[in-house]
Image (spheres, rainbow, N blue to C red):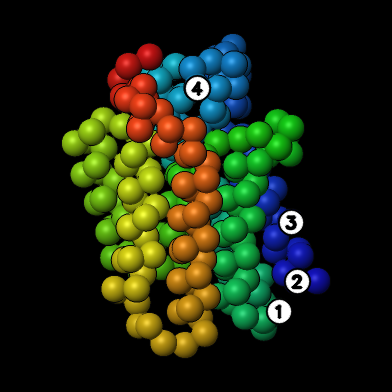
Amino acid sequence: MIWLLIFALSYLIGSVPSGYLVARSKGIDISQQGSRNIGAANVARVMGKKWGYLVGVCDFLKGFLATELGLLIASHFRSGSVLGSVIAAIASILGHNYTVWLGFKGGKGIATSGGTVLALFPPLVFASAGVVWIAVFFTSRYTSLASISAAVALPIAVLLIGGKTGTDFWLLAGFSVLMTALAIWRHRANIVRLLNGTENRFGKK
C-alpha cells in the first residue's frame, strides 16, 4: 500500500505539464507548435531560451522533489527508503512522459530524469552525465543526441563510481539502465532523423 501511495503521488507531481502551462500563459499551445513536445527544448525553440530554461528547471524540480518525497514516505513508514525513492523516480518520469492531463502525451523526460538522478545518486554521478550532455550538445548542437548520450553515460557512471555491492546498489543500477532504455525509446523518432540527417539543431526553428 505504501508503494502504491508513493507511486501515485510521484506520478501526479511528474504529470504537471510545466511546458504546456508556461506556453498557455502566453497564449501558445505548445502541443501544436514546433515538434509538438511539451519539454524545455521545444519551448525554447518556439518561445525563446528564457522560457525553455524556466520549463527545464520546473521539470527538473518535479523529478527531484518527487524522489525526495518517496524517500521521506518510505522512511516514515520504516520501509525500504531506496526502493521508495526508485519507485518515486520512475513514477515522476512516467508522469512527465505520459501526463494524464494531456491524454497521456508528454515530454521526453530528460530534465525530470536529471532531477531524479541528483536525488538518488552521488553528485559525481550526476556531474558525469551532465558533462557528457554539455560536451555533446556544444559539439553537435543536437539536444536529442546530447540527451541520448547522457542517458547512455548514466549506468556507466553508476557502475564506475558506485560501490558495486549490496541490494540497494543493484537496485539503483537497474534503475539507471531502465531510465536509459526509456530515454532511448522516447527519442526513437529523433534517432531516425539523426541517422537521416534531418534532425534540427538547437537554435533553428
Residue occupying the far right of the picture? 1
The three-letter amino acid code for the residue at tag 3 is Ala
Asked if the residues shown at circle 3 and circle 4 are in contact, with their CB atoms under 8 angstroms apart, the answer is no
Label 3 and label 2: CA atoms lie apart by: 10 Å
Tell which circle, 1 or 2, labels the residue nearer the N-terminal end.
2
Question: Is 112 or 135 nearer to us in this picture?
Answer: 135
Query: If the image is split into quadrants, where does the N terminus sit?
Result: bottom right
Label 4 and label 1: CA atoms lie apart by: 43 Å
Label 3 and label 1: CA atoms lie apart by: 16 Å
Which percent across, then down, holds residue 68? 55, 63
Label 3 and label 4: CA atoms lie apart by: 29 Å
> What kind of element bears circle 2?
helix
The three-letter amino acid code for the residue at tag 4 is Ser
Tell which circle, 3 or 4, labels the residue nearer the N-terminal end.
3
In the picture of the structure, the residue carrying the numbered disc 3 is: 8
The residue at 65%/74% (across/down) is 74
Query: If the image is split into quadrants, where does the C terminus sit?
Result: top left
Label 1 and label 2: CA atoms lie apart by: 8 Å
Question: Is 162 or 69 nearer to us in this picture?
Answer: 162
> What kind of element bears circle 1?
loop
Q: Residues within 10 Å of mark 2 (few under 14, many from 20)?
A: few
The residue at 67%/81% (across/down) is 79
Which percent across, then down, holds residue 176? 46, 63
Mark closer to the observer (1, 2): 2
In the picture of the structure, the residue carrying the numbered disc 4 is: 35
The circle on residue 2 is 2
